[in-house]
Structure formats: C-alpha cells, structure tokens
Amino acid sequence: AQSLQTYKKRENVLEDCASLQGNASEYCQNEAHFSMALEKKDLKYCQAITDEGRRNECMALQGSHINRFYLKQAIAKKEPALCQKIIDETLRSTCLSYIK
C-alpha cells in the first residue's frame, strides 16, 4: 500500500506545487518536471520548465539518462524498436548497427 501511495503522490505533485505561493510554486513545478522527465522517459517534461537554465540542464542530463536507458534495453532485448527511442542520432545509429 505504501508504494501505491508514493506513486499517487508523484502524480499529484504538480497540484501540490500549484498550491504554493509565488516563486516557491514555480520552483516546485520546475523540479517536479525535471524529475518526471526521467521517471516517465519523456523530455516533454523538460520543455515545461520555465527557468531556461534548468530547462537546458534537464534536456542535457535527462536526455543522456534516457539514451542510456534505451540503449541498454535495446541491446539486452535485441530490439531495434527501442533504438528508435534514442534521442541522439549517432547513438541511435550505433544501436541499430549493433543489433542487426
């Protein structure tokens, strides 16, 4: 039951952030989007970050984590479709070459 509660809290964290005042709300939302980018394997969460520096950091850092995640999965499962989810074009090509 505890893990389900934790998961639910993550899903509702943006609602919780919205209840904060001023800069605290924006900071909270930005950090939630940063975390969700990796958790959900989706960089659209980075795009939602309003602070440009933090958004760029999110794109670089989380993008790198996501690339490594899909590369490892593709190689382990020998699944070319997972290579297609790699953002970096060179790494994607390397992945596809390795699996074929």
Image (tube, rainbow, N blue to C red):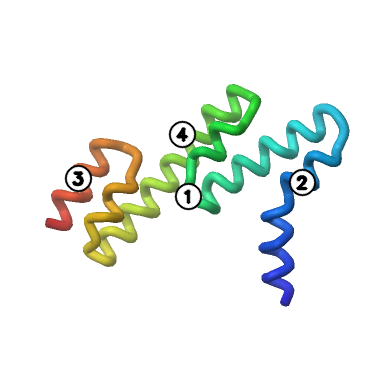
Residue tagged 4? 60
Other residues around mark 2 within 10 Å, as few (<14) / some (14–19) / many (≥20): few
Q: Residues within 10 Å of mark 3 (few under 14, many from 20)?
A: few
Q: Is residue 52 left or right of residue 92?
A: right
Image position, residue 33 (x, y; %) = 62, 41
Badges 2 and 4: C-beta atoms under 8 Å apart?
A: no
Q: Earlier in the sequence, mark 1 or mark 3?
A: 1
Name the image quarter holding the C terminus. Answer: bottom left
In what element is the residue under mark 1? loop
Name the side, left or right, on which 65 lies relative to 6. Answer: left
What residue is shown at x 79% (from left), y 35% (from top)? 25
**Which mark lies nearer to you, 1 or 2?**
2
Which amino acid, by three-letter code, is at mark 1?
Lys
Q: Secondary structure at mark 4?
A: helix
C-alpha gap between disc 1 and disc 2: 21 Å
> Mark 2 against mark 4, which lies toward the viewer?
2
User: Which badge, 2 or 3, is on the more N-terminal residue?
Assistant: 2
Q: Report how far apart the C-alphas of labels 2 and 4 lie in the structure.
A: 26 Å
Q: Amino acid under label 2?
A: Glu
Decide which of tag 1 and tag 2 comes sooner along the chain: 2
Residue pictured at 73% horizontal, 58% vertical: 9
Above or below 12: residue 76? below
Which three-letter amino acid code belongs to the residue tagged 3?
A: Thr
Residue of label 1 = 41
Provide the residue designation for mark 2.
Answer: 15
How many residues crowd around disc 4 within 10 Å: few (fewer than 14), some, or many (20 or more)? few
